Image (spheres, rainbow, N blue to C red):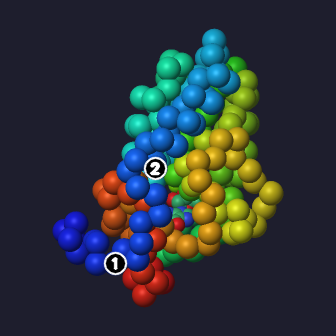
Amino acid sequence: MTEKDARRAIERVLFTKDDIAAKVRELASRIDVDYRGKDLVAVCVLNGAMIFFADLIRAMSVPAEVDSVCASSYGNGTRSCGTVTFGKDVGTDIRGRHVLLVEDIIDSGLTMAALTEELKKREPASVRVCALLDKPSRRVNGFTADYTGFEIPDEFVVGYGLDLGGKYRCLDSICVLAREKSE
Ligand code: IMP
Ligand code: MG
């Protein structure tokens, strides 16, 4: 799909490149304050958070070791199937260290609840979650992120790493898809 084709399905831009950059700087400053002097492992939740993660860790001034994990509760559709599948695991030994999971978006909350539970079994000093986007109205559990960029309504969004069936990740803004294309 060309970028021109992708644009046809976009209903509107929710957050521009500049909106996102400002929010990333704000989140990085909060993380810098909270983790100063701590042994931090920043973990990217693949694939959706890859672009956010790359920008966030470079905006932070606290040093962090970086790793990634692949966890997903979606097939190719727009709704969680309720089962969390773990692909690639975190390779770093996190015992006694501070873990910051970096996620693109929290929807039902199932993925982050399952992932934080799993990582806590490995006895880290702490596990926190930083999510760029949050759809609180969609939550099926009480999960809350420690750092949230933007709260959004119940609409399917793409771009800046977020996809629909592997498409639209490379857009530099976050967009709402036209309904007939997203469902
Ligand atoms: P949850 O387990 O339902 O919270 O699902 C979280 C995951 O679903 C996120 O990591 C995203 O990969 C994906 N997801 C949820 N909502 C959207 C969306 O609006 N656009 C793209 N991906 C989404
Ligand atoms: Mg994700």
Query: Identity of the amino acid at label 2?
Result: Asp
Residue 132 location (% of width, % of height): 55, 49
Quadrant into which the N terminus falls: bottom left
Q: Quadrant of residue 72?
A: bottom right
The label shown at residue 9 is 1
**Residue sitting nearer the eye, 113 or 160:** 160
Residue 29 location (% of width, % of height): 57, 28
Position of 25 with respect to 167 (left or right) is: right
Q: Residues within 10 Å of mark 2 (few under 14, many from 20)?
A: few
Dot 1 and dot 2 residues touching (CB under 8 Å)? no
Q: Label 1 vs label 2: CA separation?
A: 21 Å
Q: Quadrant of residue 33?
A: top right
Q: Which residue is at a point 61% across and 72% down the rendered structure image?
A: 154
Q: Is residue 69 visible?
A: no
Is 41 located above or below residue 2 in the figure? above
**Residue sitting nearer the eye, 93 or 146:** 146
Position of 9 with respect to 78 (left or right) is: left
Q: Which residue is at a point 48% across and 41% down the rendered structure image?
A: 22
**Residue sitting nearer the eye, 70 or 35:** 35
In the rendered structure, which disc, 1 or 2, sits on the residue that comes first in sequence? 1
Kind of element beneath mark 2: helix
Q: Is residue 170 visible?
A: yes
Is 93 located above or below residue 150 in the figure? above
Q: Residues within 10 Å of mark 1 (few under 14, many from 20)?
A: some
Which residue lies under the disc numbered 2?
Answer: 19
